[in-house]
Amino acid sequence: MTLLHQRASQRTLEFITRLVFGLWLIKLAADALPRLSLLPPAVFDPVGFLGVMPSTLRRLILSGSFLWTVEIATVISLVLVLAKVARTAAALVACAGITLHLGIARSFAGNIGHQDLVLLYAAYWLALCPVADGFARRAHDRRLAAPQPSRPEIPLVGIVATLCCTYAFVGIFRLVQGGCDVFAPETLRFWALRNSYHVVHPTWGLGKLLLESPRLTDVLTWGFPIVTAFEVLAPLCLVSRRFRQLFLLVMVPFHLVSWLVLDLFFWENLALYVLFLDEPWLNRLTRLGHDVVDVRRWGIWKHPVPDPVVEGGAIRADGRIPMRPA
């Protein structure tokens, strides 16, 4: 078994970086944080790190000027990351702004939206790994004559591991907390009807169909243990290609059915499912370049420019593997 993204390329890392920070730019641009200053302070129930903040600072962060500052600074940082301008510093500022943005917004909602957490962790992986990589390379460069190449596989494997662990933790918690009773037909029917009638404007409201269609209830009831099993075993996606394929076949329909019936849609997780694809498929998907072998075999470019080949601490741009020193 081979670790997923063990031989990831810089092209793949660049694509995932643009995907993650681009999604955050869309999410924050559609969420008007400064409007929260119009709400009464009594509604503010701090969550996370905001709970230990002094009351004087709480009044400051609820002011319209501060919220506008956070909004503008975060959006500018995200744009700089996408434009590859001071990317390392901009990514760190963007992650701090996103965290503060979510903390303030969720303090008015009274809970932490776990649909945002994996995408937030992905942003931190992409922001912190270049910092750690810079420290590591400086330490190696003091002892070695040749510069050491970066490791694009580390943040990609970290993001996939985080995504898989969230599924595993949810599945394990469901089994430990609810036991076998959680798989009873009344469980899904209760949540489907609750979200269809309790929410003022449900997205679909198709959970009401469970009252009229016992067969649909049976299908969901029998599928729930299967989904839970795949959630618990999700970390196997890191090392098993066959399990990754089965995981996608089960979990993609699960998220779509949850959206239609339960009005719960984790589209952020679905967007990160692209990381479950193998490296050759990601290269075809991104269209950000061609491997040297593929270019020469298919003759796509008349004068191809091969990727640098790293071998023995040396970097060559002609596509040839340099000789190892004796």
Image (cartoon, grey):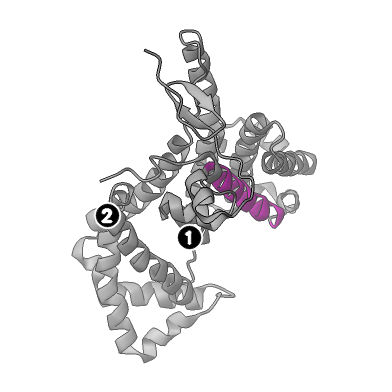
Q: Classify mark 1: helix, strand or loop.
A: helix
Q: In this figure, which residue is indicated by the disc labeled 1?
A: 270
Q: Is residue 255 left or right of residue 138?
A: left
Q: Residue furthest top?
A: 143
Q: In this figure, which residue is indicated by the disc labeled 2?
A: 232
- Characterize the local packing of mark 1: few (<14), some (14-19) or many (20 or more) Cα atoms within 10 angstroms: some
| Residue 246 versus residue 309 in the image, above or below | below
Q: Which residues are magenta?
A: 13-30
**The label number, if any, that marks residue 231 in the structure image:** none
| Residue 123 versus residue 109 in the image, above or below | above
Q: Quadrant of residue 67?
A: top right
Asked whether residue 111 appears in the rendered view, the answer is no
Q: Residue furthest right?
A: 65
x, y percent for residue 202: 55, 75
Q: Is residue 227 left or right of residue 310?
A: left
Amino acid on which the number 1 mark rests in the picture: Leu
Earlier along the polypeptide chain: callout 2 or callout 1? 2
| Residue 50 versus residue 200 in the image, above or below | above
Q: Quadrant of residue 300?
A: bottom right
Magenta stretch containing residue 15, yes or no?
yes
Q: Classify mark 2: helix, strand or loop.
A: helix
> What is the C-alpha distance between the residues marked 2 and 1?
18 Å
Q: Tell me which residue sits at (36%, 46%) in the image.
A: 4
Q: Quadrant of residue 230?
A: bottom left
Q: Is residue 139 left or right of residue 62?
A: left
Magenta span: predominant SS is helix
x, y percent for residue 31: 68, 55
Amino acid on which the number 2 mark rests in the picture: Val
